[in-house]
Structures are given as structure tokens and as C-alpha cells.
Image: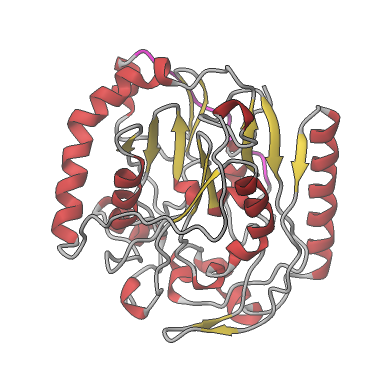
Amino acid sequence: MLRVRCLRGGSRGAEAAHLIGALLGRSVAGWAQRVFQSTSSAAAAQPRHAAEEEHVTESAPQECPVCSYNEWDPLEEVIVGRAENAHVPPFTVEVKANTYEKYWPFYQKHGGQSFPADHLKKAVAEIEEMCNILRHEGVVVRRPEPLDWSLEYKTPDFSSTGMYAAMPRDILMVVGNEIIEAPMAWRARFFEYRAYRPLIKEYFRKGAKWTTAPKPTMADELYDQEYPIRTVEDRHKLAAQGKFVTTEHEPCFDAADFIRAGTDLFVQRSQVTNYMGIEWMRRHLAPDYKIHIISFKDPNPMHIDATFNIIGPGLVLSNPDRPCRQIEMFKKAGWTVVKPPTPLIPDDHPLWMSSKWLFHDFLMLR
């Protein structure tokens, strides 16, 4: 789900994030910049161009239908994804790096095919019920277009089938009154943005800003084709060394690797978000917003919200299985760090693309 509009006049999070932003800015930003420069000498600041096919007058902030600065202000409008027609992604190197070995036979057998019908039926029903609950709470619910994800597409660099439009939080980010389309890093998600374009165009015509990050070619050079991941120990070792399946060949990131706290955004380098992608976001949002890189003891980093979820001003839910390496800075800044209970999902529950900590990734209504 994607938070589109929150209560106007709510906290922008600056008062909660100011001190930690300053601390991390001194200790992390310089390091991240050095890492980025050393891994990608080809990166250079690119001028932003605006192309207008028709005259569009930017609305005043109070008129814009898009307005969200953090993860906790009272929710007024949200985009909820769809599980209809969802397909298993082909078993490519980037998918292999983000899944566990016990599920690899499932991907090898079903890659490019529909998810099991009974599983999809339950998913669709659960999402519909979630929409009903949100509407009952007075939240405006918007949905992406249902598309046929079975169609194979081909670019000069790769071919693939699609996946789904179930996770708007992965591909879209709202920063103030701006919608940012993430470039993504999985080939099966290359065209996922198409399901959201009708909604984004509607928001744009009503005054929202709309930015699409540079789309990667997703050529073979973006991935470490020999990435060694057989055991959890392998993953821990590689993650601790800062080695991931995505290279610095070109910018890539998923929106779900960022989490917002007013004018400070926190991000992790992960299997789907590289330093070039983080640097693009830093330059794009500067000087009004600051990007801070944080890291975790996580064998398979992908999307920050099931690991580190900011749920209020100076209040963060931190996954005890994936401790934040910079957590003392947050505590020093006066933040309250809450550790959730251990999940009770049984071991035999099919978690092809997630972990038991999925409950850690939740939506704040108010």
C-alpha cells in the first residue's frame, strides 16, 4: 500500500528527525559519498528536464491531492495493490539472490507461470477485505489497473514475463506533493509501473509533481552473475562485506528501501537498491531533503520496512533479528526504539517472497 494523502497540517517529522539527521549526516553521508564515488566513476550530475505536452498549472500545496511526508500522519487516501493475474517471476540471478534455497524448486518449476490458483484466490479476498476496512475507517482507497502479467516482453538486453501490481509501496514513493516512480531491479518488474500510470496521470493533472527515476537497462552487467548464495552463512558473510547481487553498473532502487521522517529519509543498500540509485535520490531531493544510509545485520536485505519501521515522531519499530548498526545514534538523539514480539507464523507456511517478519511492515492509519 502507498500513502498518498495524509492530514494536512500534520507533523512533517522534522522535529523528530532533526538531531538524528545531523548525527547521521556527519558520520554516514560522507562515507556513503566516498563509497559511491569509488564504485561508480561514471556517475555525474545530470540536468533535470521538464517536457510538457500540455499546459499544466501547478496547484497550490493545499489543493494538491498528494501530500505525505512521513509514515504516521492520519491517513486520508491510499493506493492498495492487486493480486489478480499475479505470476511467479522467472528464476533469474536477482530472484535467486532474494529468495531462500528451500524455495528455489518452486521458482524453477513455476517461473513465468501463475501463482497457485487457491493461493491467489485467498490473496484477492484478503486484499478486498483490507480495502473494505480502510473505507470503513474513512480512507479513500485507489487501485491500480488489472494487467496480464503472463505476456512475455523483450528489450535489447533481456526478456521476461511480468509479476504483479500487488505492492505499490515497492515502486512508488510520495515525498511531499511529489510522486517518484522507482526504477526497480528485477527484470520481472520492469513494466510494473504501467498498472499505476492512469492513477499517476490523474494525480498529476490535479497538481501533483511526478518524477520517474532513470530506468535501468537491466543488462547482465547490473548483476553479479556469479553471486555465491547457497547458505544463510554465505548471505551473512556477503552482506557484512557489503557485497550484493546488484552492481554499480547503473542506478537502481526499489522505493520500499526508503523510509520517510519529514525532511530526513533513511535508506539501506540492498539486493535491489545500489549506491548509484541512492545518489540519484540524494541529488534529486537536495537541498530540501536529506538522505541517510543505515545498515543492518541482515543476510538478505531487501526493503527496509520489515526491518526498521518509523511509526511516530522519534519512535521506531526495530526488528530484533536484523539489528540496526547505527541504532545507538538514534538512542542518543532521544528516539524510542521498540522491539516487536517474535512472529508465530508456522514454519510450513509458504513464504516464497517474504519472511515471518512480514507483520513488521504495516500501515499506520492515525
The percent position of residue 253, horizontal first and vertical second, equals 41, 56
Q: Judge whether residue 251 is colored magenta.
A: no
Q: Residue at x 38, y 21 (%)?
A: 17
Q: Is residue 296 left or right of residue 178?
A: left
Q: Residue at x 29, y 58 (%)?
A: 238
Q: Front-most of 164 and 141?
A: 141
Q: Is residue 99 left or right of residue 31?
A: right
Count of picture labels: 0
Secondary structure character of the magenta stretch overall: loop
The percent position of residue 169, horizontal first and vertical second, equals 58, 47
Q: Residue at x 64, y 81 (%)?
A: 109
Residue extent of the magenta highlight? 334-345
**Image position of 110 with respect to 97: above or below:** below
Q: Front-most of 117 and 105?
A: 117
The answer to which image quadrant residue 145 occupies is bottom right
Residue 116 visible in the current orientation: yes
Q: Is residue 363 left or right of residue 176?
A: right
**Image position of 39 with respect to 203: above or below:** below
Instruction: Name the residue furthest front.
Output: 55
Q: Residue at x 63, y 69 (%)?
A: 163
